[in-house]
Image (cartoon, grey):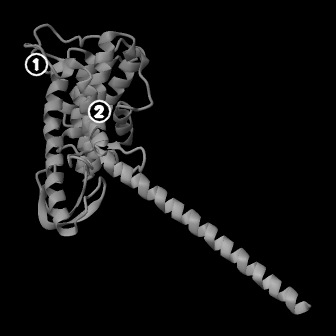
Amino acid sequence: MSTGFALFQSAEMKYYQGNTASAFDYYQKSIKKILKDEIPTAKAPLPAGTKVPDDMPQELLGMVWRNFVGFFRDPNMNFTEENSPQAYKLLNSFRPGATKGYPRLERTERGRVLLTGMQVTAALTLGLLAWDKRDRATAAKRYREGIELANKHQAFVRLPPGTKGWELYVYHDLQEVKDNLGIIVANDEINAELVKGASGEEPKRKEVVDLPLPQVRVDKTGVATVEDTVKFATNACAKCGKRDSKLLVCSVCKKVHYCNTGCQRADWKYVTLSLLSRSLTLMLIVKNTQDFLHQTLRRSYDVVTRLKKKDR
C-alpha cells in the first residue's frame, strides 16, 4: 500500500507532467492517508541538501496541505466546489467550527499547532473561493474566522526572528488575507455612505443594493467588469458606526448590531426606548382589546334586554 509520502511524490510527478487534475487527486489521497494511518507530525523524508523556501513546512502533512490549498487558490487551475466536490469537502472539514474532529492531530502539542494552522488556512481559502463567486459576505466571514482563530495562537501572529516552516507559511497567508478583509470593509464603508446619501438607510450584511455610481470589479483572472449593484459583507455598529463582518447582535431586539459590549452599554438609551415603545404598544393593544370586548358584551346585553322587553 502506498505511503503518504509516495502519494505526495505521485502528485508532484503528475504536476510536472502537466496533469493538474490528477496531481490534485493525489494530494488529497496523501492527506487522508497521513491522517488515517501515519504520524501526522512526521517530517518529510527529503534528500539531504534539498533546498526549499523558508515558508515550506518541514512536516509532510503541512507540505502536502500547502500545495493542496494552493491548487484551490491558483486562478489558472480553476478548482471550485462545483467541479471538485470531494476536495472541497476535505477543505471545508477543517473550517473553524466544523464538527469533524482529527484526534490524531489533537494528541500532541505539535499536532495541535498543525491542526490550528490547517483550520486557519482552510478558512482563508474558503474566503477566497467565496470571493471568486462574488459572495462578499461569506468571504468576509471566512476571513474573519481564520484571523480570529490565528489571533488566539501567538505562534502565527508574533514570529521570533528566523522563524521558518509551518508557522511562517501561516503567517504569510494571514498578512495577505488581512489586506483582503481590510479592502472589503473599506469598500463597504464607502458604499454605505453613498447608499445612505441616496436612501437614508444603513445597508445590512448580505443586502444587495443598487449603487449610485457603477464600480469596476477585477476577478481572479484579471478580467474587469462594471457592476451596478453590491452585496454588503458587513453590518454597522448602532453606536459608533464601525462596520465589520462579525458584530454582536442585541439580545433584546435581535436586530441592532454592536462591535462590543461597551458600545451596547453606551447605547442603552436606544435599547431602553425600544423596550418602552414595545411595552407601550403591547399595553395599548391589551387595553384596546379589553375595551372592545367590554363594548361588545355591553351591546349584546342591551340587545338581549330589549328583546326581553319586547317579548313582554
Q: Residue beneath label 1, please?
A: 54
Residue 23 in sight: no
Q: Position of residue 163 (x, y in %)?
A: 12, 14
**246 relative to 202, above or below:** above
Q: Is residue 197 left or right of residue 110?
A: left
Q: Foreground mark, 2 or 1?
A: 2
Q: State the mark number for residue 122.
A: 2
Label 1: few (<14), some (14–19) or many (≥20) C-alpha neighbours in 10 Å: some
The residue nearer to you, when weighing 84 against 20, is 84
Where on the picture, by quarter, is residue 70?
Answer: top left
Whether residue 107 sits left or right of residue 291 in the image: it is left
- What amino acid is labelled 2 in the image? Ala
Instruction: Compare marks 2 and 1 and give the one earlier in the sequence.
Output: 1
Crowding at dot 2, Cα within 10 Å, few <14 / some 14-19 / many 20+, comes out as many
Image location (x, y in percent) of residue 83 = 33, 47
Three-letter code, disc 1: Asp
**Inter-mark Cα distance, 2 to 1:** 21 Å
